[in-house]
Each structure stands twice: as C-alpha cells, then as structure tokens.
Amino acid sequence: MRTSWADSVANSASENATTNSSGTNGLKRPTRSTYVPPHLRNKQPSADPLPPPHAAPPAPSPVNDRAGFGGPATGSRWGGDYSRPDFGRGGYGGGRGGNAWNGRSGGWDRGREREVNPFGEDENAVEAFGGEQENSGINFDAYEDIPVETSGDNVPPPVNTFAGIDLGDALNENIRRCKYVKPTPVQRYAIPISLAGRDLMACAQTGSGKTAAFCFPIISGIMRGHGVQRPRGARTVYPLALILSPTRELSCQIHDEAKKFSYQTGVKVVVAYGGAPINQQLRELERGVDILVATPGRLVDLLERARVSLQMINYLALDEADRMLDMGFEPQIRKIVEQMDMPPPGARQTMLFSATFPKEIQRLASDFLSNYIFLAVGRVGSSTDLIVQRVEFVHESDKRSHLMDLLHAQRENGINGKQSLTLVFVETKKGADSLEHWLCINGFPATTIHGDRTQQEREQALRLFKTGKTPILVATDVAARGLDIPHVAHVVNFDLPNDIDDYVHRIGRTGRAGKTGLATAFFNENNSSMARPLADLMQEANQEVPAWLTRYASRASYGGGGRNRRSGGGRFGGRDFRRDGSLNRGTDYYGGANSSSGYGVPGGYVGGYGPGVTSAWD
Ligand SMILES: Nc1ncnc2c1ncn2[C@@H]1O[C@H](COP(=O)(O)OP(=O)(O)OP(=O)(O)O)[C@@H](O)[C@H]1O
C-alpha cells in the first residue's frame, strides 16, 4: 500500500461559478457542415436555413432536433449560450494543491481563473423529471449478495465504506456531493486493489459504478504524488493518467464525472475526442492536464503532432476494455500503449474495466498488464437482474407497427407510472434516420444518434433525450456502451445485435445504479443465431423465456456463432482466463468441451468487424 497522504487540500476555491458545459439557450438544428467558430459561440443563433426535412404534425410538448419539429428548447455547447466548460478554473485549493499544481499547469494563469463547480451540471435533467435527485434512494442492497471472484497474487481485501479507504478529504467531500453513500461491490474490491498499486482487469455488470472505481484511485494517487516533476515542452503536455474509451459521448461523460470527483482537489481533467475542433482541445491541454480522457483516434492525432507525450503516464485505464481491444480498435490501442512513449507494464499502473470480457480479449489484454488481479463481480457478461427482459416474435415488416403499439401503451400507462425515456436500438445509421422520421410523423417526437451525424447533432440529440424534451432516442451501437442516462425506463432492440455481449451492453442502458428497467427485443428468423445465447442469458437472469424461443434455441446450431457461443450457461462466469491452463501463446485457451469459459470460441476471436464491414462506432 502506498503511504497515506499527509495533508488535505484546503477548500479555498470558489463554488460560486455554476456555468456548465451544456449551455442553456436555444439553438436550432445545425446543418451538418456548420462549424461555429469559438468567437461566435456566445452569439444568438440565426434562423435555421434548412427547410424542414419532413412534413410533420406539430409535436406536442416534446421536441425533436430536426428542423420542423419545434427545435430544441435547450442550447448546444456549440452555439447559443455556450460557456467554456473550464473557463474560470483556478484557485485550486491552495496549500499542497497549489504546490502540486505548479508542476503540471502548462503555465496558465490560474490566479485569474476559477474552477467551475461541476455539481450544477444536471440541473436541467433533474428539473425535467420533477426535481428527483439522481442518486437518492439508490438501492445498492440489490447488489449485496452478488457473487465476486478475484484471482492473482496477494489480493488486497475489500472495504465496506468510503471512510474505510484513504482517498483524501477533498475527494471524500466530492463523493459526499455526488450522494454516494457507500461503495458499490465493484468499488469495494477495485478501489483497494488499485490503491495498492496493482494492475487490474475488472468485470462488473452494467450500471454498477465502474467509472468511479477507476477514477477514485487515479485522482487520489495524483493528489498523493503531488509535486511530481514533469518535463516542460514548448507545446507538449505530459498527463499523468490516461483514460481511453470507445466513443466521444462516453469520453465526455467520463470527463464530466471525473471533473466532479476531482473538484477542488487540484487535479485537472481534460477531454479530447474526434468530431470537435482540435484547436479548442489544444488550448485546453496547454492550460495543464493531469488526467487526459480521450478517444483513441483523436489521441493518436495529438501524439503524432507531438502535442501530448505519454512519457509521464502513471495510470492507464481502458473503459469498455473488451471493445477497445476488439478488431476495430486494437491496432490504435497497441500504437498508443506500446509504440509511443508510454512507460511499459510494471512501470505504470493499468486498469481494464468492462461488463463483458471474452477470454480471447482477456488474452490480448494481458499484454498490457503486469502481475494483475482479475476481479469479476456478478456474472460476467450477464445482464443485471434489475432489468426485466422481454422478447417478442415480430416479423421484419411488422416491426414499426409493433413499436407503435408499445409506445402507445407506454404513453397511456407509463412505465411504473413514471415519466420515462425510451431508447430504441437499430442496426444501421440509415435505419435510425428512417425510423426517427417515421416516429416523428406519427406523433412520437424522436431524435437519433449515430456515426453519420455531426458531433454537434449527436450531442444535441443526447441532451434533448436526457432532459426528456425528446423522450425517444433511436440509436445505433454508438450509444450501446457506457452511457449513463437517468430515467431510461425502456430499451427496445428493434433490430437485435449479432453479438450477445452487445445485447448485454445495450439493455444495460436501463436498470442502472440499483433502479429497475425494461428491455424488449424484437426477434424473428433473421436472428436465429441469437436464439440460444439470448435464451441462456435470460435464463441466467431468471427471466421468462418464451417457449418459441426455447424451440428456436434448440434448433439453432452454434457453428461459427462468434462470441455468441457460450458454454456452461447458468453458472457464475467470472473466470480468469489464466485459470484455464497454459499461458503460452498459440495454445487454444478457449476451445474444448471442458472449457469453463463463458465464451468458447475455438481458434480466436471472431467478433468485431471484418474487413470492409462498416462499423456503427466512431
Ligand atoms: N457508490 C455509489 N453510490 C450511488 N451511486 C453510484 C455509486 N457509484 C456509482 N453510482 C452511480 O451509478 C450510475 C452508474 O455508474 P457507471 O456509469 O459508472 O456504471 P458502469 O458500471 O460504468 O456502467 P456501464 O457498464 O454501462 O459502463 C451512475 O449514475 C453513478 O453516478
């Protein structure tokens, strides 16, 4: 264990500034090619020059971000009443924090800037849902008897309370501000392991608090290692921690969370992601960065421009680590982690987190780790019991009318009697646009998020959805992982994914943080390869499996079913691949009838995207 820190950070920074990164004033849908330069972002937007894309009846109170649907009532961070999220940062706690800060500031004058209080950010969302506080009444008792498995040398014992962990006063104060009363199971185990300086591969169910599990030890560690000397490059910055995530929106969300956790600690968090102007991100970086949250593509760009060096990285966290190491991202991740100037495993601390961790990905991931601890909380790759799962047989041609029936019933009855949000997953970007249009013209204001929309449109869509102004979001898999949107009561798999892990992540957008949720899947003959994994998963989660699905499942063959191939269904799947035998490369870790893997895919990983296949991801 590291020595405990000596002194606390004085809370001298002002909490008065409440400007947030969301902006609050009106902005109509921007055109796809419109980039609003920073100097114009505080101006009132002019009228949208676009004609309405579709003739639509006037929406009732909810709105859509397409022109002709009333336009959003809220602003965009790209226009309207835009405020720079980090403008006015400074006054970082003085005392020890002040010393530490000098070593990593990049030379900006903190004396003239104040740190924005990030705890005002969700005001809109709270207001739209009747002022409900997000973390009040969370019932983490639901997770109490969850199975936990750890493996590795000298695993540090778990803790039961935040007070039992030496995180530091300033961070503890932020935990209190977040209204986190006690650690979730993954936090109870992962935080002591990380504070002990150990590498970690952690699997825990969706919505169970993994973000804080990797953020708290990083922030605490940086606070304790204050005064660390960093090189002073002319324009190069030297972050101490790197958090990588697969999508822009998830990176922004982690950044927002990390800013809350690090408020008044003296630790500075910056985000860099594609689709947004790089110059603005460069300016932000130049003001100093301790924790860099990034998507891989934008980070590679920054590294190639020599604007970021990874030489001083002490902490590396990969969120959605299995996604980051599948075929789509692995080359970029290897480049960042192995081919630039990042310290090697052992000289840095590496933490990998996800709700799903196929064994073949575990093997790839082990290249990045040193003497790591494997932690599994709950059934790896399983859904949480908090989500009621339904699967309905719906022919392709009937899907729209079936969805309409669901939405009408929901409008009349609500879900659990509450105002709620519905997230509808489809396979393709075109399909998303087309379904959104159809919903809108049928009186259900919807918006959409997918890779063909501009970043402004994506962020706007997410904001309208989160605030309840557009209560239906049609999405591709770009929204499947990590996004923590309160009040998503219903996830509809209009098109089922081809991979059971993707299904797990998609339905995990509801039933989060101890709350219940509903997930409905439309199944037809095109999804027969999903029949068995879906039936197995539902059974594991004590869900009612329709007889027709069981019949489909018994007929379905597993030949080449990608990651859908599970063995040993119904058992706790938290299995460290190192326990399965040889660690030698070239050995078939995964195959064989006796594999205890949740994913018995002989011959390597076959998920992800093959050559020429378009990804719905960034
Ligand atoms: N100890 C806690 N007490 C109360 N709420 C918490 C606690 N830890 C996290 N939360 C809340 O739980 C929600 C889910 O957390 P988070 O987004 O980190 O989940 P996750 O495990 O990363 O999910 P996913 O697998 O979907 O990425 C968030 O709203 C977060 O604020």
Image (tube, rainbow, N blue to C red):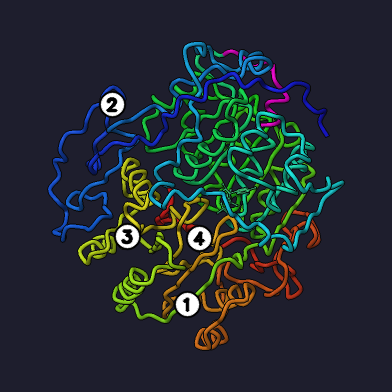
Name the amino acid, label 2: Asn
Name the amino acid, label 3: Ala
Q: Mark number for residue 42?
A: 2
Q: Residue at x 13, y 40 (%)?
A: 49
When the figure is inspected, residue 513 is found, relative to residue 349, above or below; the finding is: below
Which badge, 3 or 4, comes first in the chain's sequence? 3
Q: In 3D space, how far apart are the residues under numbered discs 2 and 3 (Cα atoms)?
A: 32 Å
- Pinpoint residue 443: horizontal percent, then vertical percent: 23, 64
When the figure is inspected, residue 237 is found, relative to residue 323, above or below; the finding is: above
Q: Quadrant where the N terminus lies?
A: top right
Residue linked to disc 3: 432
Which badge, 3 or 1, comes first in the chain's sequence? 1
Image quadrant where residue 141 sits: bottom right
Whether tag 3 and tag 1 are in contact, CB under 8 A, the answer is no
Residue linked to disc 4: 510
Which badge, 1 or 4, comes first in the chain's sequence? 1
User: Is 77 placed left or right of 43 in the picture?
Assistant: right
Q: Which residues are magenta?
A: 219-232
Q: In 3D space, how far apart are the residues under numbered discs 1 and 2 (Cα atoms)?
A: 47 Å
